Amino acid sequence: MTKILLVEDDKGIVANLTEFLTGEGYEVKSAAGQTQALALLEEEPFHLVLLDISLADGNGFSVCCAVKKTYGIPVIFLTASSDEYSAVTGFELGADDYIQKPFRSRELAMRIKNILRLTKGAGSVVHLGDVLVDTVKGTASKNGKDLYLSALEYRLLLVFINNRGAVLSRTQLLETIWDIAGEFVNDNTLTVYIKRLREKLEDDPQNPALIKTVRGLGYRVDL
């Protein structure tokens, strides 16, 4: 059974998420702060950590660093913070995803499923054509060179990888960006970030082989 460590000091959130995720087939244990979380990680193996930034003791960024350095398992941040700085910091520390409170339980379940699918059995490195994505370090490289993706670019890339073969509408992608950038997102923002991703990933951005446009529907990644 997949085991999730929920690091959160809000007892109401812990109770609700534990009940929901248990119903989804996961085994859930919780910790209110950094000390308890690291102690549980030492005692038993977990497959994924759900992590709040503000904790009863310590902070989520420190926990994320320790998790990635010692255990190399996926981390999803759950936070009420809506500023992009928090998202960027989380991704720089190796977080695999970031979801802003309040969130829909079904959306969280989907995010968990996608991250576990992305990392299961493939180590920390995922291939997309000749692009390598290290989900532990939160980096992407091509031909041995770091692509230096921004937080939003990396987030979009993970969404495409998690949904290979599926057509993703602009609305779906906009909702993904919104989780980080909040009210500043609009349709032009998505166009800009798709363009930037293609410029960094594609051999020929004008004729993309990785992120393909499905006319009238959205975008798809098959490789």
Image: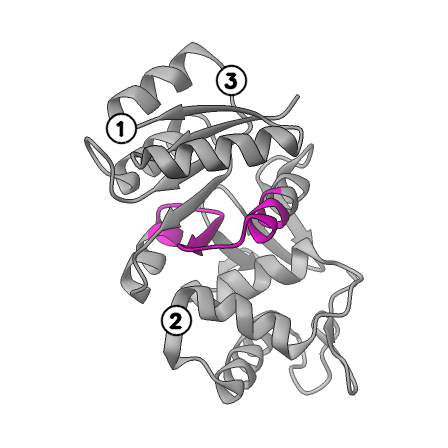
Secondary structure of the residue carrying numbered label 2: helix
**Disc 2: which residue:** 181
- Tell me, yes or no, if residue 206 can be seen here: yes
Q: Amino acid at mark 1?
A: Gln
Distance of label 2 from label 1 (alpha carbons): 27 Å
Name the image quarter holding residue 80. Answer: bottom left
Q: Amino acid at mark 3?
A: Pro
Check if mark 2's residue and mark 1's residue have beta carbons within 8 Å.
no
On the rendered structure, is 166 left or right of 4? Answer: right
Disc on res. 45? 3
Q: Residue at x 57, y 34 (%)?
A: 21
Q: How many marks?
A: 3
In the image, the segment drawn in magenta is 90-112
Q: Whole-percent x and y of residue 174?
A: 55, 75
Distance of label 3 from label 1 (alpha carbons): 17 Å
In the picture as drawn, the residue positioned furthest to the left comes out as 57
**Disc 1: which residue:** 34
Disc on res. 208? none
Q: Is residue 173 magenta?
A: no
Q: Whole-percent x and y of residue 134?
A: 53, 47
Name the image quarter holding residue 42. Answer: top left
Q: Amino acid at mark 2?
A: Ala
Q: Nearer the viewer, residue 220 or 108?
A: 108
